[in-house]
Every structure is written in C-alpha cells, then in structure tokens.
Image (cartoon, rainbow, N blue to C red):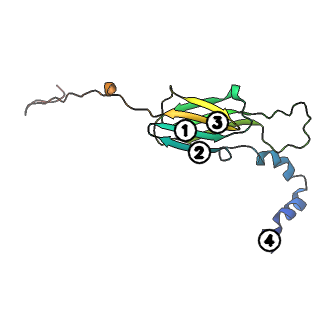
Amino acid sequence: MTDKWPYNWNEWMNHFLGETFFTDFEPLKHSPDAANIKVNICESHNALLCIFQIPGLKLDEVEIDVYDRSLEVIGTVQIDQKGFKPIHLELYQGPVRKKVKLPFPARHDKIRATYQHGYLYVYLHRLIGSDKTKKKIHIETSDANGSVYD
C-alpha cells in the first residue's frame, strides 16, 4: 500500500476497476432502507403517535401492522412526473418498509392513520389487560402423608 491509499482511494479504485464500476451501484446508495425512513414516537397517557417521514407514499398500497410492542409500515413510494420523461433520477421510488419498537404493547384493533405533506401519522392505543382475563388459581393442600399428584 502507498501513502496515498487513505486519501486517494476512490481515484485509485477507479483506475484499478474502471471508471464505470461504481456507477452501477448508484441506485443502491439511494434506496430507503429502514435507517433512511425517519420516525418520531410521541406518548400521551394511554396513546401513541408515530410520525413517519415518507414522501410520495402510495396510500392505496400501505399496510400498517401492530403486534405486541412493534409497529410496521410497508408500502410503495411513487412520484408522479406528470407526463415528463425522466432524465436524471435521485429520488427513491419503490418498496419501503419500517419496523419500530413501541414503548408499550398497542391495540391492533384501534389504529387510525392520516397522511399529510409527506408525513404518515399513526395513532395507537395502549393494550390494557382486563380483569376478566385474570383467573384466580386455586391452590390445593395435601396432608403430611399424601402426595399432591394422587
């Protein structure tokens, strides 16, 4: 290795692999993996508000799933060029998926979502256990000589 390696590595790699080698990977640089979709989670008593920043979201294809302490949003980003032919594309279009961990379990049957100016607002309610589901367990006693399993 030379003393130029840390400083001019890109230039060296282009010379070694050819100038067009890295251009084939350009679309991957812009794909919205989970880290690129930003989300805010806000709490108010027994409710949560999750705000996802997903401009161009195709609303008729969005799936919102809540299970236990997880919220997952799956959809597609599509930008309408209104009849224009694309020449240079940097904005991502295609499938998106984001899964976030919630601070408490949420109800899957009481979800409300709205979409405004590129932000998806998902309103959730805390899953609160009911006293009806709790069952008192009867504890049996045994005499000194008897077995519990008889």
Q: Do the residues labelled 1 and 4 touch (CB within 8 Å)?
A: no
Q: Which of marks 4 and 2 is in front?
A: 2
Q: In the displayed orientation, state which residue is furthest to the left.
A: 144
Q: Distance between the residues labelled 3 and 1?
A: 10 Å
Q: Quadrant of residue 4?
A: bottom right
Q: Label for residue 40?
A: 2
Please name the residue that numbered disc 3 is placed on.
120
Mark toward the start of the polypeptide (4 vs 3): 4
Q: How far apart are marks 4 and 2 (CA)?
A: 45 Å
Mark toward the start of the polypeptide (3 vs 1): 1
| Local crowd size for mark 1, using a 10 Å CA cut-off: few (<14), some (14–19), many (≥20) | some
Image coordinates for residue 104, horizontal then vertical, percent: 46, 40
- The kind of residue on which mark 2 rests is Asn
Image coordinates for residue 146, horizontal then vertical, percent: 10, 29
Q: Distance between the residues labelled 4 and 3?
A: 49 Å
- The kind of residue on which mark 1 rests is Leu
Please name the residue that numbered disc 4 is placed on.
1
Image coordinates for residue 67, horizontal then vertical, percent: 51, 32
Say which element carries label 1.
strand
Mark toward the start of the polypeptide (2 vs 3): 2
Q: Distance between the residues labelled 2 and 1?
A: 8 Å
Q: In the image, what residue occupies the spot 77% across and 46% down?
A: 30
Task: Confirm whether residue 67 shows in the render.
Answer: no
Q: In which quadrant of the rendered image does the C terminus lie?
A: top left
Q: Label for residue 49?
A: 1
Q: In the image, what residue occupies the spot 51% across and 28% down?
A: 108
**In-image side of 29 versus 73 (left or right):** right
Q: Are marks 3 and 1 in contact (CB under 8 Å)?
A: no
